[in-house]
Amino acid sequence: MNILVCVKQVPDTTEIRIDPVTNTLIRAGVPSIVNPFDAYALEMSLRLKEAVGGTVIVLSMGPEQAKNALKECLAIGADKAYLCSDRAFGGSDTLATSYILSRAIKALEAANGTFDVIFCGKQAIDGDTAQVGPEIAEHLHIPQVTYAVETSLCENSIRVKREVEDGFELVSVSCPCLITVTKPKFDPRYPTIRSRMAANRAEIPVLTSADLDIALSYAGLKGSPTKVSKTFTPSLKQGGIRISEETGIGCAKELVRLLTERKII
């Protein structure tokens, strides 16, 4: 089975900073990690590979430092890794990002064969849009299943257990397909020292706009129909008034007095 996993390197949520001029994330000097939901997607792909055989390729889009996230994926068990990186891609919103990744997937399929299944995390913790995975499926004109917690191969289709509001449902989707992954019952595996050392030595091919059949008018800030109009740090509001009386009736009377005093009631 030929499997692709789209991953994103995201800033540690406790260290996020935003450029007030461009309204984009400042990545320099900020600790970065593999997006947690993408790590679940990688683990699910590796389990599927172990069950039926095949190859797992990881793909990311981002600056040069995103290679660190890809090497982490190689250390965990991915077979190959590729990075989409070009200054023309900077500032892409979800639509532009999904377009670029879809073109990169087409380029990888030309070299590696059609992917039977593409895994994505349900969303990235920096943007929380949950849009890129489904948009990739639309660009590629393949079926999609979202919020997966478990997958298995059933003849020429993938059986997916997906999370819904009131529990779970089982669906079957034909290949090729795209599946987005939420938090399953299992955790991502840890790399070994040997696999980490091998991953650190790995060369990550970089795909630029020159390598892909891309219309640059659909990439980067120019190709992004959505823009961040304003960013700000919310001001801290003063805490409320604590009512401390010996009885519930006493608290109620004091509350009525305060509300009446402020002419709220």
Image: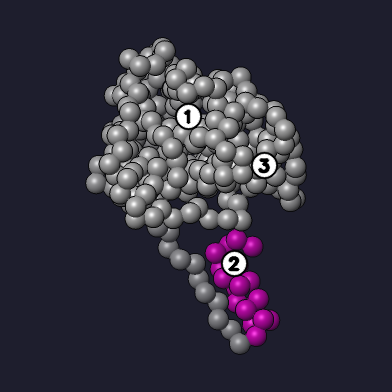
Q: Cα distance, mark 1 to mark 3?
A: 29 Å
Q: Residue at x 33, y 15 (%)?
A: 210
Q: Residue at x 29, y 44 (%)?
A: 200
Q: How many other residues sit within 10 Å of disc 3, few (<14), some (14-19) or many (≥20)?
A: some
Q: Cα distance, mark 2 to mark 3?
A: 60 Å
Q: Is residue 134 left or right of residue 212?
A: right
**Tag shown at residue 152:** 3
Disc 2, SS: helix
Asked if residue 30 can be seen in this view, the reply is yes
Disc 1, SS: helix
Q: Nearer the viewer, mark 1 or mark 3?
A: 3
**Tag shown at residue 94:** 1
Q: Quadrant of residue 205?
A: top left
**Tag shown at residue 259:** 2
- Extent of the magenta region: 247-265
Q: Is residue 260 magenta?
A: yes
Residue 88 percent coordinates (x, y): 32, 21
Residue 134 percent coordinates (x, y): 58, 30
Q: Looking at the picture, which amino acid does disc 1 mark? A: Thr
Q: Nearer the viewer, mark 2 or mark 1?
A: 1
Residue 231 percent coordinates (x, y): 37, 40
Q: Nearer the viewer, residue 148 or 27?
A: 148
Q: Nearer the viewer, residue 66 or 218?
A: 66
Q: Cα distance, mark 2 to mark 1?
A: 47 Å
Q: How many other residues sit within 10 Å of disc 1, few (<14), some (14-19) or many (≥20)?
A: many
